[in-house]
Image (cartoon, rainbow, N blue to C red):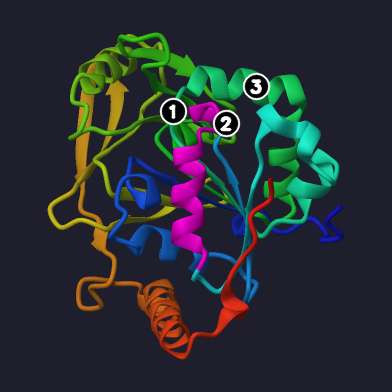
Amino acid sequence: MSARADVPVGSRIIFAMGGGGFTMEPTNPLLDDFVLSLAAAKQPRVLFLPTASGDTTAQINAFQARFADRWCVHEHLSLFRLREARRSLEEIVLEQDIIYVGGGSMRNLLAIWQAHGLDRLLVQAWRSGTVLAGLSAGAMCWFQGGVTRSSGPPEPLAGLGLLDGSLTVHADGEPERLPVWLASVRDGTLPGGWSLDDGVGLLFGGLRMDRVVSSRPGASAQRVDQVAGELVRKRLQPELLGDSEQSALGGVDEAVQELRRVHRVRRRLGDGHGHGHGHG
C-alpha cells in the first residue's frame, strides 16, 4: 500500500485525452512522453488499465511496445484475469505513480470498476498524488459525464465526477458524438464542458484545467456552456507538444524533450535498465 500522505488538491493531476497515444498513434510518442513527464518520480511506475476494451491483447501489446523502452516500470492490470495477480488490487493500484486508462466502452468500464471496488481505489490513489491519465472512455470517466457509444448510438452517460463538467471525445474522428453532446448540454442532461479532437489532451491540476496540449498540428478543442437555454462556445488553441516556440509554459514541455533525449541515448547504448515489466 502507498505510504504517501495526502497531497495538496492542486497537486492532484488528471490528464484527459480525446484520442491518441499508443493505441492510435503508434509512431507519435508525444502524448505518452507527456504523460510520463507528469510524474514526480524519476523512474515512474506506470499501470495500464485496459478494462474498457475488455482487456484485449492488442491494447496490452501496444502499451508494452510503447513503454518498454521508456525510463519507467510498467505493468498492466486485467480485471478479467485477477486470478493471475500475485498482489492485492489495493497494493497494485496504490503503489503506482501513473495510472493510464485505455479506451473502449465507458459503461462497461464503470460497471466493472464498481464491481471490484476499483473506482474507490482510483479516487484514493489520485488523492495521494498518483497521476490519472486516459483517452476516450478512459478520459470521460473522470468527469461528471460524457458521450458514450457503449450501446451503439452516441448517448450521454454519467461518470465518476472527480472533475466538474462533461467531456466528449473524437470530435473530428467520430463527429456523430458532437451533436448528441451539444443537445445534452443545451437541455441540461450534461453540464457544460469540453469537446476534444483526437490528439488533444486537457491537463487538470486539482479541479482546475491548466493546459490544453496536442500531438497533432491543426487539432482543436472547445469549451461549451449553456446560458439561458443557449450554447456559448469558446474555441481553445492547444499547445503543440514538441514545439517550444508555441508553448507559453515551457516547463513540462522541456521535461518531455529531456525524456525523449534520454530514451534515444539509452536505445543507442542498448541500456536495458529502462525497460519496464509486464504483469500478467
Q: CA distance from mark 1 to mark 3?
A: 13 Å
Q: Is residue 115 magenta?
A: no
Q: Secondary structure at mark 2?
A: helix
Residue 8 image label = none
Label 1 sits on what residue type?
Gly
1 or 3: tag closer to the N-terminus: 1
Per the rendered image, the range of residues in magenta is 51-68
Does 118 sit left or right of 166 as displayed?
right
Say if 56 sits above or below 97 in the image: above
Residue under numbered circle 2: 51
Q: Which residue is under mark 1?
A: 104
Q: Amino acid at mark 3?
A: Ile
Q: Is residue 208 visible?
A: no
Task: Give the structural element (helix, strand or loop) at label 3.
Answer: helix
Q: Are marks 3 and 2 in contact (CB under 8 Å)?
A: yes
- Front-most of residues 55 and 113: 55
Label 2–label 1 contact, CB within 8 A: yes
Q: Distance of mark 3 from mark 2, alpha carbons?
A: 8 Å
Q: Which corner quadrant holds the C terminus? A: top right
Q: Could you say which is closer to the camera, residue 173 or residue 72? A: 72
